[in-house]
Amino acid sequence: MGLLTLIHLISIPVTNTSVNPARSTAVAVFVGDWALAQLWLFWVAPLIGGVLGALVYRLIGCARPTGEQAT
């Protein structure tokens, strides 16, 4: 079972956790102060994860068979 599934099953019903950056942004704008100060993580973390995923794919996931050339 994935981490996101656990978050949906446990954390959201108990604490109303937001796992969607767009939803988090809307709520933070209305709450202000401390919520806006923590909002950067909801946008930066997925971007860093995407970049790391792309780098890992380039390193280990897209090897071509011997003799095949890129077009």
Image (cartoon, rainbow, N blue to C red):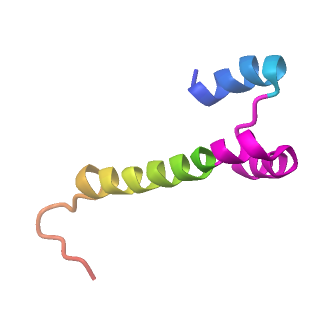
Magenta stretch, main secondary structure class: helix
Q: Nearer the viewer, residue 37 or 25?
A: 37
Above/below status of 11 relative to 69:
above
The quadrant holding residue 14 is top right
Above/below status of 38 relative to 5:
below
**Magenta-colored span:** 17-39
Residue extending furthest toward the left: 67
| Residue under the point 60% across and 52% down | 43
Q: Position of residue 6 (x, y in %)?
A: 65, 21
Image-based side of 19 in relation to 71, left or right: right
Residue extending furthest toward the front: 33
Q: Quadrant of the C terminus?
A: bottom left
| Residue under the point 73% across and 41% down | 35
Residue extending furthest toward the right: 30
The quadrant holding residue 63 is bottom left
* Residue 25 shown in magenta: yes
Above/below status of 17 relative to 65:
above
Q: Position of residue 39 (x, y in %)?
A: 66, 47
| Residue under the point 62% across and 46% down | 42
* Residue 30 shown in magenta: yes
Q: Quadrant of the N terminus?
A: top right
Q: Position of residue 64 (x, y in %)?
A: 21, 62
The quadrant holding residue 66 is bottom left
Image-based side of 61 in relation to 24, left or right: left
| Residue under the point 72% across and 39% down | 34
Q: Give the total number of marks visible in the rendering.
A: 0
Q: Position of residue 53 (x, y in %)?
A: 40, 50
Above/below status of 22 relative to 6:
below
Q: Nearer the viewer, residue 8 or 16?
A: 16
Image-based side of 51 in relation to 37, left or right: left
